[in-house]
Image (spheres, rainbow, N blue to C red):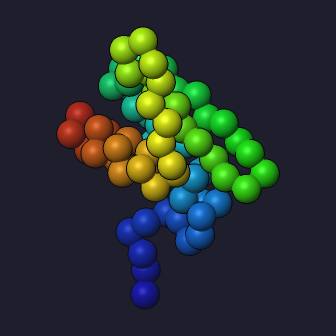
Amino acid sequence: MTSKHRFQDAFTLAEEAERLGKKALSLGLIPSLTVHLFSDCWQFSLPNGEESETLTPEEAYLRFKKLVEQSGQ
């Protein structure tokens, strides 16, 4: 059985979210991206006006995947 997802656990999900975030950044779909790595979790920060929106790896993966898919890349 093959999976269309590139992740198997929380760590690989976070890595895939980072990969998609970098792709969205390179395509100009987001203005900037900051990834905070803590010992027990990753946080993804996106600028949102004057503040930053903080996303979990799951939220970031879904957001970046949707952006990249909508761009046709």
**In the picture, residue 20 is in which quadrant?**
top left
Quarter of the image containing the N terminus? bottom left
Quarter of the image containing the C terminus? top left
Residue most toward the top?
50
**Residue name at image x 67 percent, y 52 percent:** 41
Q: Is residue 54 depicted above or below 60 in this figure?
A: above
Q: Is residue 15 depicted above or below 18 in this figure?
A: below
**Residue name at image x 28 percent, y 45 percent:** 66
Q: Is residue 48 depicted above or below 6 in this figure?
A: above
Task: Tell whether 10 sits left or right of 39.
Answer: left
Residue most toward the bottom?
1
Task: Tell whether 12 sits left or right of 32.
Answer: right
**In the picture, residue 9 is in which quadrant?**
bottom right
* Residue 8 in the image, given as x and y percentages of width and height: 56, 71
Tally of numbered tags:
0
* Residue 6 in the image, given as x and y percentages of width and height: 49, 63
**Residue name at image x 59 percent, y 51 percent:** 15
* Residue 58 in the image, given as x and y percentages of width and height: 46, 55
**Could one spot residue 19 in this view of the protein?**
no
**Residue name at image x 58 percent, y 28 percent:** 34
Residue most toward the right?
39
Q: Nearer the viewer, residue 67 or 50?
A: 50
**Could one spot residue 41 in this view of the protein?**
yes
Task: Tell whether 43 sits left or right of 52.
Answer: right
